[in-house]
Image: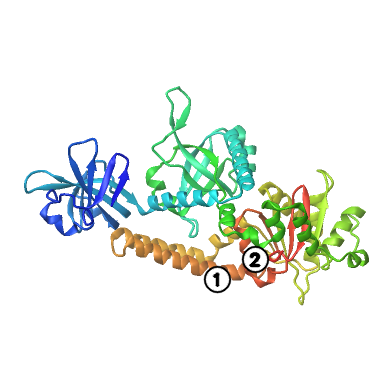
Amino acid sequence: MSVNYGDLVMVDIKTESEPTDGVPAQLRSLAAELKYVHHENKVTDRLVYTVRDVQVGQGDLLEIGMYRNIDFGDMIDTNREIEPGSYATITFEIVQRGEDSFELVILQALTQTAQMAKLSKQLQQRKFDEMPEVMEAEIQHNIELETKKWESVGLLRIAAFNNSNLFSGLRPIMEIMDMSKVLTFQKLLNASRVALIKQKASAKEGEWEDDEVYDPQIGTAFETVNEVNRCVIQLKPHYRGKFETSFQIDDVFRVEADIDRDDVAFWQQKRHEENEVFKHTIEEVSRDKLLEVLEEHACDRDELAQMTDTTEFPRRLNPTQNAAIQMALNEKRKLVCIQGPPGTGKTYTLANLIYRILRQQRSDKIRKAIVLTPTREACRNIENATRALLASKPLRKNPHDHALMNPLLFNEILENCQESRDGLQLVNAWREEAASGRISWEEFKKKRAEHIRAIYQEKLKEVMGNVIIVFSTISSSFVDVPTRFPSFQNALCIIGGLFMYFIRGACTF
């Protein structure tokens, strides 16, 4: 069977009657797997072969431009494709040098990391293609909007490297080059998904341009403590391996917003179909069908007319704000929608609602809530308002330090616990063993992953047992963390934005 590959035609020798006289005797046993490559525009033919899942150690690199494979012997590496590490594939050409001699010349070496990145990119694009057109347009719009904000900040440079955390791996510390943009820069942080594009000096003095030698590096940007002009980038796993060797201190990057992988996964898993209201809002159905679904979830009109909302009237609130809290705390109400233009006190009302949930906790009845917002800034505003209210009017019984939880705090707890510090020392010891050849890099990765998973599961149960209120953006993967626990199955779900929605049963509605 022939496979077109650019201007090449690749033919499997086993199934085609192509000549095999050019195959060296030492490789005739591989005839079933060799590829006969015929250039349509050239007189000569070529023979290429690909080996898979190859581990390369320092001792396999004989000298510059030479690599010794355990199965096939010495190979010429003119382009210096090979360096110590794990390779998904190494493709080489068998070059006849005489009647009885040949050389093996490496054409391409694809690391496990590069292959994963390539496959991940293809897979993510296929998932993106499955997304409804209206949602794809919205996400593309949000990406463009976020990218413009990063453009207004300007370029970033690598200020340092941090490899002191168990869960995050290698993390570059990035610093803005224009200090006048600090305030804008800080607003963009807090779990921003970004793509770092390496820059090089332009022909025009003082200007920069994209360095096309390097692929964009994908990760998440977090703010750093007490350094307003810096952020830390938590790289995606398959970008961590070569970052430190590919880039160095003072390398310059521009930043773009990255595709939200959680949004992609949401559509790939068809989770929108779990909610009839959402499903029929996105899909093209008649208005009557959507109204029918809404009516099925609505309270009975007679019951609604007789429903009373009772709660203590906080003197800090006006009657309308108090009515909103009364309705939200009424367990008979499945859905409450509160609308108000900017400045009408929606965030303040939310903070008071959360305060009352915390104040009403009883040992026999723990009420929990998940607060979701479309933007990180809105989420921070609600949490800050809640903490300010708790500081100004402390509860009779102080809540646990983990009662109010957000993704950044959760990550900080994981990284700073004693189990993580001990685990980091153990992982570093395994890394040294892999570097010295006492264990393979694949074994190191497996042991590291299993160890991290065990610590994560243990700390997750411990922390979430004390959480009452979760703050998160709607698209964050952290949303799935509390919903795994039975105690959050009937939590109040608060969705903040121009409108506020209070939904009973965060996981089921």
Write down the quadrant of residue 405 in the picture: bottom right
How many other residues sit within 10 Å of disc 1, few (<14), some (14-19) or many (≥20)? few
Q: What is the three-letter code of the residue carrying label 1?
A: Glu
Mark 1 secondary-structure assignment: helix
Along the viewing direction, whichever of 255 and 490 lies nearer the viewer: 490
Mark 2 secondary-structure assignment: helix
Outermost residue toward the front?
17
User: Which residue appears at 76% of the width and 69% of the height?
Assistant: 367
How many other residues sit within 10 Å of disc 2, few (<14), some (14-19) or many (≥20)? some
Taking 232 as reference, is 182 left or right? right
Please say if 182 is above or below 122: above
Mark toward the start of the polypeptide (2 vs 1): 1
- Mark 1 highlights which residue? 458
Q: State the image coordinates of residue 301 (x, y, percent, origin top left).
A: 89, 64
Taking 484 as reference, is 237 left or right? left
Taking 386 as reference, is 407 left or right? left
Along the viewing direction, whichever of 68 and 464 lies nearer the viewer: 68
Q: What is the three-letter code of the residue carrying label 2?
A: Thr
